[in-house]
């Protein structure tokens, strides 16, 4: 899944979560610096979290001739629903897993890596080998 389609997918997934206050693309939020991503406010919060999405093609694949054809497999297991009090990284990871998208093979939270840095975000790996890097701005 390329970043443009992923942005639309995430907006659709997130707007249906009961704890979402507001979600819109970064473009709709007035951010012309980052072409793909979302601006998210949870219900009961005035704090907006902005996420930038960048993509990586499957290993060995070139941009020319690449088509963003969905490859389906077993979705990431759905866990508990995201809660309004969750940190943004945990909230978005839970929302993506709960969507049970057959294109998504794995959702990795950066804060749970063995040597996490200060940057918060997610790596979403798809069954076709492509990846989306979602980082909190």
Image (tube, helix red, strand yellow):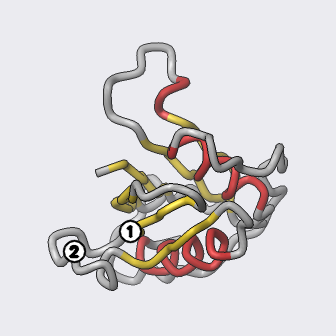
Q: Position of residue 29 (x, y in %)?
A: 31, 78
Taking the spot 55% from the left edge, 59% from the top edge, the residue there is: 42
> The residue tagged with tag 1: helix, strand or loop?
strand
- Front residue (pair 114, 126): 114
- How far apart are the alpha carbons under marks 1 and 2? 9 Å
24 on left or right of 26: right
Mark 1 or mark 2, whichever is nearer to me: 2
Residue designated by label 2: 31
| Quarter of the image that includes the N terminus | bottom right
Up/down of 46 relative to 3, above or below: above
Residue designated by label 1: 37
Taking the spot 51% from the left edge, 46% from the top edge, the residue there is: 88
Sequence-first disc among 1 and 2: 2
Taking the spot 59% from the left edge, 76% from the top edge, the residue there is: 9
Q: Quadrant of residue 96?
A: bottom right
> The residue tagged with tag 2: helix, strand or loop?
loop
Q: Position of residue 86 (x, y in %)?
A: 61, 40
């Amino acid at each position: 899944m390329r970043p443009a389609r992923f942005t639309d997918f995430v907006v659709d997934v997130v707007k249906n979560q009961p704890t979402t206050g507001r979600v819109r693309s970064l473009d709709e939020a007035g951010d012309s610096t980052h072409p793909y991503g979302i601006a998210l406010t949870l219900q009961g919060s005035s704090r907006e979290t902005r996420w930038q999405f960048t993509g990586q093609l499957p290993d060995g694949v070139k941009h020319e001739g690449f088509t963003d054809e969905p490859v389906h497999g077993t979705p990431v297991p759905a866990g508990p629903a995201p809660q309004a009090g969750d940190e943004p990284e945990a909230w978005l990871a839970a929302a993506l897993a709960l969507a049970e998208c057959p294109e998504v093979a794995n959702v990795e939270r950066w804060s749970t890596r063995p040597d996490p840095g200060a940057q918060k975000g997610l790596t979403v790996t798809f069954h076709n080998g492509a990846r989306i890097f979602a980082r909190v701005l």
